[in-house]
Amino acid sequence: MSMNVPDLYRIEHVEYACEGVKVFRFHAPEIARASQPGQFLMVWLPRHDEIPISISDVCEGDVEIAIADVGDCTHRIHEKSAGDMLGLRGPFGRGFSFENVHRSKICLVAGGYGAAPLKFAARRLIERGARVYVLLGASTESNLLFVDDFRRMGCEVRIATDDGSSGFKGTVVELFVELFGYDVRYVDEVWTCGPEHMMYRICSITKNAAIKTQVAVERIIKCASGACDSCDIGGLRVCTEGPVFDADVLQDTEFGLWKRDESGMRVPVKTGNIISSPATPPIFIPEDDPMLESNVCGIQFKNPLMNASGFAISGKMLYRIAKSGAGAVVTKSIGLHASHGHPNPTFIEIEPQTYVNAMGLPNPGINAYKIEIEDAKRANVPLILSIFGKDENEWLKIVKIAVNYPIDMIELNVSCPHSGFKALENDPESLCKVVRKVSYVAHSHHIPVVVKISANTDDPAYIASLVEKHADAICAVNTLASKPVERSLGIPILGNPSGTGGISGKKIAEIGKKVVFRIAENVSIPVVAVGGIFSAKDVFDYAAAGASLFQIGSAIVSRGLPIFEEIKNELRKMLSEKGYKNVSEVVGMAHKR
Ligand SMILES: Cc1cc2nc3c(=O)[nH]c(=O)nc-3n(C[C@H](O)[C@H](O)[C@H](O)COP(=O)(O)O)c2cc1C
């Protein structure tokens, strides 16, 4: 398998598994070998979209997925026949845990096409000597999925249909209660997949009976790699930390209450439900860190590390980043109105730890974002709100709303290479006007303004010098424009209309460091470094080039949230070995002669 990009596979076999659901089989030995029940593949319909689909079975190098005809993309995939090609990548995510399943009694509870991952799980459970009960629910008999498959494997299958056309008349939750009562001690574990309100009710019953329960959660998946946070549930990323969670882990999240739409906006799990918030996170007090503390633009940072914009959309995720050791947090770029962003594929890995994304700035809009900022602020670190506008009018409207929120800085994203509209940094006259007007509003509320630029213009240092008069700091670099193609089809891989995305990660560190050096040479306001920071050495290089604060993005994908503590530990060691008392002593060192 290549890096994390879709590869094309031939459909070997396709057939209806029940009304509205088709199973597709591919010969994909590497994917088959790596797959675990509960994991999912990203299925690419070239020129259209890429969607997450659970693996429903694996056998002798073949992988099977079941696709319900529920939307435009799935409908088009249903029109495909054996011999046609689809792109696949994966497997992704965390599957079911098989710890202690030998000789135990496991009850699988499926609603609708939630039976798909449970079929693969049942096969592996039976192989491991578990006794498997399967409760299958559907609205009517023709929608029951994999009944015969479960029976052939040796599972004890019970059925519930809403209309009573097969088995028990009622919901699968009612059947569950009918069979086991509310005191479920008859089984050792419950694994469930299906509509969230159904799983929520199952979890309430099993919680009372203290039965270990694993839940396969569905959320909107975009990057599938733990980068974009579109699939957030209570600060957990479903694409990498799920989709299977222990029910206990979901307890303090919005599970069963609300989810997020494509923009990141909170929407009820069940139409008509009220969006009641789960508990706000407890107040967190970050520790003092004398060697790393910094004061930039009059703001005190316990340490100069923070996440880069775009790696957290929920307030809970920002809070979690702060708890992981970041000295500040930066929001996703927020616009005036909610926006869904681009179709998938939106995020691929082109070389080890080098990525290209074209998310297209999905965000819930500035009005809906207040609640996320409030959650994030419970972590007590400076919060930088990143914003973008399509024209001067939008920039001003956003900033006038934003200044009333509990934010510490505003970062102007004037440099996204895949927003679908011209980046402001490409229009110096408008850029200067917007920075002047936005800064005027922000400064009247004592909020400093950072302008984030890229290496995509001919002379980033010149752009920085243009805005220096009104901005308080410059942030560089945003992603580097690029258009990766699928070679056999000869088309761009990324799903947005232009196919252009931005490179991030390892590959842009060198250019980022050069750009920061040139900017620091040209301006006298602070510089915030971003681009390929993976280690304390990168921080040291950027600081020497003239940066005072450091944003980490892609390294969160490759190395996870521990990256903040790892870099801080490395950095303290490096500084003390070289005899420095504080990181600020390194800032601009490369400019001295
Ligand atoms: C998935 C993803 C989403 C991003 N979203 C934003 C965004 O909303 N606003 C922004 O200014 N930059 C965004 N960026 C760019 C990053 O903030 C950062 O400038 C870039 O990734 C380089 O840093 P890195 O090499 O550490 O990832 C995004 C990058 C990625 C990979």
Image (cartoon, grey):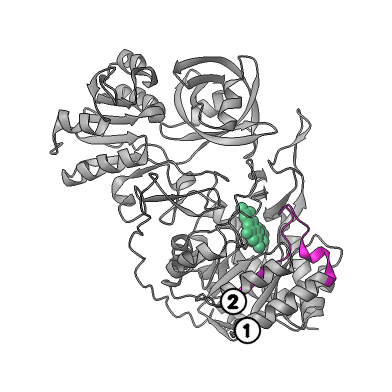
Residue 109 location, quadrant:
top left
Q: In this image, 4 relative to 273: left or right? A: right
What secondary structure is found at the residue carrying circle 2?
strand
Q: Earlier in the sequence, mark 1 or mark 2?
A: 1
**Image coords of residue 89 (percent x, y):** 58, 34
Vertically, is 345 above or below 171? below
- Of the pair 66 and 586, the residue shown nearer to us: 66
Image quadrant where one finds the C terminus: bottom right
**Image coords of residue 79 (percent x, y):** 61, 20
Q: Going 47% across and 60% down the picture, which residue do you hit?
A: 317
Residue 135 location, quadrant:
top left
Q: Are marks 1 and 2 in contact (CB under 8 Å)?
A: yes
- Which span is picked out in magenta? 409-429
Residue to which mark 1 is pinned: 297
Q: Going 70% across and 33% down the picture, which residue do you hit?
A: 47
Q: From mark 1 to mark 2, how far is it between C-alphas?
A: 9 Å
Q: Which mark is residue 563?
A: none
Vertically, is 317 above or below 443? above
Question: Ligand 1 near label 1 (Cβ, under 8 Å)?
Answer: no
What secondary structure is found at the residue carrying circle 1?
loop
Q: Going 38% across and 55% down the picture, which residue do you hit?
A: 275
Q: In this image, 243 relative to 545: left or right? A: left
Marks counted in the figure total 2
Q: In this image, 191 relative to 360: left or right? A: left
Report the residue that reaches farthest toward the right.
Answer: 458
Tell me which amino acid carries mark 2. Met
**Image coords of residue 155 (percent x, y):** 27, 19
Tell me which amino acid carries mark 1. Cys
Q: Residues within 10 Å of mark 1 (few under 14, many from 20)?
A: some
- Of the pair 62 and 270, the residue shown nearer to us: 270
Q: Is residue 435 visible?
A: yes
Residue to which mark 2 is pinned: 409
